[in-house]
Amino acid sequence: MTRRTRWAPVGLLLGTAWLAGALVVPWAWQVGVVWAWAGGLPGAVGALVAGSAVMVALLFAAGLPVRDMRPGPAAPPVRRTTAGQVGWAVAVFLGGSAGVALGYLVRRSGDIGLGGDSTLFLWCGVPYALCAALSVPARAVRAAAGAVTACAAVFLVWSGYQADRSKELASLLEGSPLRREQLLLPEAPDGYEIDAGNGSISAGGFRLGYRHTGSGSGKDRMRQPFQYEVRPGSVSPCDDRTLPGPATCKDLGGGFTSVTRTLGDGSSAGGMALQRDGVTLTVTVYEPVAASELRRMLERAHPAKDGEILRALRFEP
């Protein structure tokens, strides 16, 4: 065979595997679901069996030219008998179906960026084409198919994990008047991290704590844990009833307000609040801290990442 004719059967096989998977599998699934919904279980099973038989037959026929194709260097013949060809077609069908099932389960968790329902069927053929390519007697094709398969598996698993996290986050935010983009976190000083699992979110806002890890430069002036909260609307920190004791507030201009609170044990807590983006950000400290440092923390508040919110609400390293 010339190089041109050598690759022709490979292209035919992969194209047939993709097209058959994109058309036959969604059709058989939809017909089966309709029959099952109508109470016709035998019809549903029949549709799935018929679709499977058509897929195996198409793969068998498309693989015949490749079966007799002269293998490339160090690539042994894949199959030489009719029984082996049938077994190969069944194996490709089962492997491709497993890939489709994995993609379906992941997509049920949320949008994974593969398009809408009108174009999603095109992706159904990809697992079948990849499985067929893994047995082509050409090292370059097998290596490329293996790399793409591995990347696709990692992508689907990671997308499913991210989708589950997004769904969990959405459920945690239910009942809160805060929009997702209003969940802002402060620019914490060096050596501080979110105190995992000690945060809360409710109709009153989003509250969490930060703790010092013992690391950071020696220039850090803050060492004690501090509290932070995001409350909807414009709220004076003096109206915060989550901390005991009377509070004194001073308007600093530009949306900033300083607050000093006398606690029940005679100690005091200081802090600063900033009104921006329809919310009030408040940081509360239990040690003397320069006003410039508190202002910096609030001015540089940034939208929280999903992982940061989940870490605050539940322990997630």
Image (tube, rainbow, N blue to C red):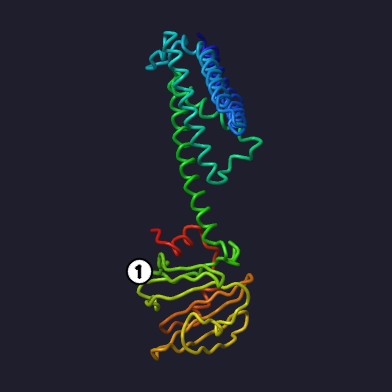
Q: Residues within 10 Å of mark 1 (few under 14, many from 20)?
A: some
Quarter of the C terminus within the rendering: bottom left
* Residue 41 % position (x, y): 55, 28
Q: Residue at x 35, y 69 (%)?
A: 213
Residues 61 and 148: in front is 61
Q: Is residue 224 left or right of residue 184?
A: left
Pick the residue in front: 232 or 176. 176
Q: Is residue 261 above or below residue 225?
A: below
- Front residue of 69/95: it is 95
Residue lying furthest left: 214
Q: Amino acid at mark 1?
A: Thr
Q: Is residue 280 above or below residue 130?
A: below
Looking at the rendered structure, the secondary structure element under dot 1 is: loop
What is the x, y in percent for residue 284?
A: 47, 79
Image position, residue 232 (x, y; %): 60, 72
Q: Is residue 233 left or right of residue 314?
A: right
Instruction: Say which residue label 1 marks.
Output: 213
Determine the residue located farthest toward the front in the rendered image. Answer: 39
**Residue 181: percent from left, percent from top:** 59, 62
Q: Residue at x 58, y 82 (%)?
A: 236
State whether residue 230 is above or below residue 30: below
Instruction: Between residue 270 and residue 264, name the one nearer to us.
Output: 264
State the residue lying farthest toward the right.
118
In terms of image quadrants, where is residue 74? top left
